Image (cartoon, helix red, strand yellow):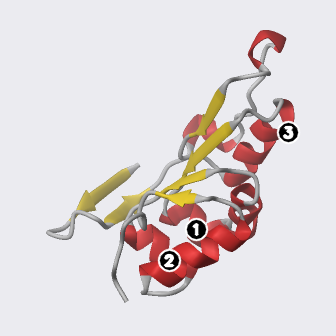
Amino acid sequence: MEGEYTHQLNEAHTLDTKLNVFETFRPKIPEAYRSPDLLFLGNIDPELQLDVLQKLSRPPLVACDTMNFWINGKRDALWRVLEQVDILIVNDGEARALGEDTNLVKVAQKYSRVGPSTSSSSVGSTES
């Protein structure tokens, strides 16, 4: 992946994405790791995030990350992930793109209706 931040450090711009091994990657999770205390679903294909979620016992806390590549390309799968997580970690630009609104308060409200109770981009925001 290649990206950059402008003077607005709360928005990343993806310049190039090469999925390489992650394009066909499907993890094999050993039985001993299928009941985690918490789970962080890193910035990977939302369909892969869903695959991981289905293979595990639901831990008390699930967080996920995403980026504009998945927001634009796999929005429906990403919303299915958000229905199953507690925390969403995105920057302001990603939050606005996913929520399809420039107002971060409205975006956070939209997220909370779907699933995540916390979004790192919008916590404490007073923007209107």
Mark 3–mark 2 distance (CA, rounded to whole Å): 27 Å
Dot 1 or dot 2: first in sequence order is: 1
Q: Is 41 rendered above or below residue 74? A: above
Q: Are marks 3 and 2 in contact (CB under 8 Å)?
A: no
The quadrant holding residue 56 is top right
Q: Distance of mark 1 from mark 2, alpha carbons?
A: 7 Å
- Total numbered labels placed on residues in the image: 3
Q: Residue furthest left?
A: 7
At horizontal 74% and vertical 16% (from top left) the residue drawn is: 33
Question: What residue would you read off at disc 1?
Answer: 71
Disc 2 residue type (three-letter):
Ala
Number of other residues with Cα within 10 Å of mark 1, as a class: few under 14, some 14 to 19, many 20 or more: many
Is residue 108 positioned above or below 77 on the image? Answer: below
**Circle 1/circle 3 CB separation < 8 Å:** no
Quadrant (top left, top right, bottom left, bottom right) of the C terminus? bottom left
Assign a secondary structure to mark 1: helix
For the point 71% across and 23% down, which residue is it? Answer: 36
As drawn, the label of residue 40 is none
Residue 79 sits in quarter = bottom right
Q: Position of residue 69 (x, y in %)?
A: 53, 63
Provide the residue designation for mark 2.
97
Residue 91, quarter of the rendered image: bottom left
**10 Å crowding of disc 3: few (<14), some (14-19), many (20+):** few
CB under 8 Å between callouts 1 and 2? yes
Q: Is residue 73 above or below residue 25?
A: below
- Image check: 24 left or right of 119? right
Sooner in the amino-acid sequence: mark 1 or mark 3: 3
Label whose residue precedes the other's in the sequence (3 or 2): 3
Residue at left offset 39%, top offset 72% = 93
Per the image, the residue denoted by label 3 is: 54
